[in-house]
Image (tube, grey):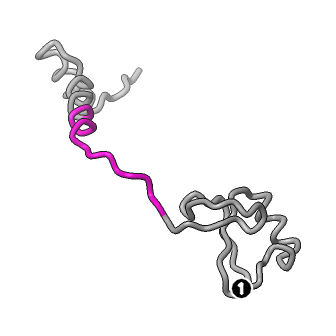
Amino acid sequence: MMRPAVSLFVLLALSAGCDNGRSPTDDIDKKRDAIQKSATPQPPPSGKPVSCPVCDLQFDSSEAVERLQHEGETYYFLLKDHAAAFLEDPARYVKIR
C-alpha cells in the first residue's frame, strides 16, 4: 500500500510552527493587521450629480444601478425597474432641453 506524498511546503509550514510555538498563521495575521492599520482610508468614488429620468431624484452618477444611451445622451437610473420603464417608452421620460 502506498502512502500519500506530503508536499515540502506542508512540511516546512509545520516545522516553522513547531520551532517557535506559534502557528504559521500568526505571522500572516500580524502582517495583515499592520497593513490594514497603515492603509489610509479612501473616500468613496464620486461622479457627477445626475437625476433619474423616471423618478427625477438627484444622485451621484457613481451610485447608478443602470446606464442607458438614448439619442446620444446617457441616462442614469437608481433602479433596474426604472431603466426597464424607460426602455419601454423613452419619449415619456426624456425632457426637452
Quarter in which the C terminus is drawn: bottom right
Q: Residue furthest top?
A: 21
The segment highlighted magenta reads 32-46
Q: Is residue 35 above or below residue 45?
A: above
Q: Residue furthest front?
A: 97
Residue 39 located left or right of residue 88: left
* Quadrant of res 79: bottom right
Residue tagged 1: 97
57, 40: nearer the viewer: 57
30, 55: nearer the viewer: 55
Q: Is residue 57 above or below residue 71?
A: above
Q: Residue furthest left?
A: 19
User: Is residue 45 one of those drawn in magenta?
Assistant: yes
Quarter in which the N terminus is drawn: top left
Q: Is residue 51 above or below residue 70?
A: above
Mark 1, Cα crowd under 10 Å, few <14 / some 14-19 / many 20+, is few
What amino acid is at disc 1? Arg
Residue drawn at 82 percent across, 72 percent down: 87
Residue 57 x %, y % = 69, 59
Q: Is residue 8 visible?
A: no
* Quadrant of res 80: bottom right
User: Is residue 13 one of those drawn in magenta?
Assistant: no
Residue 36 located left or right of residue 53: left
Residue 62 x %, y % = 54, 61
Residue 18 x %, y % = 17, 15
Residue 73 x %, y % = 67, 82
36, 56: nearer the viewer: 56
Classify mark 1: helix, strand or loop.
loop
Q: Is residue 82 visible?
A: yes
How many numbered callouts?
A: 1
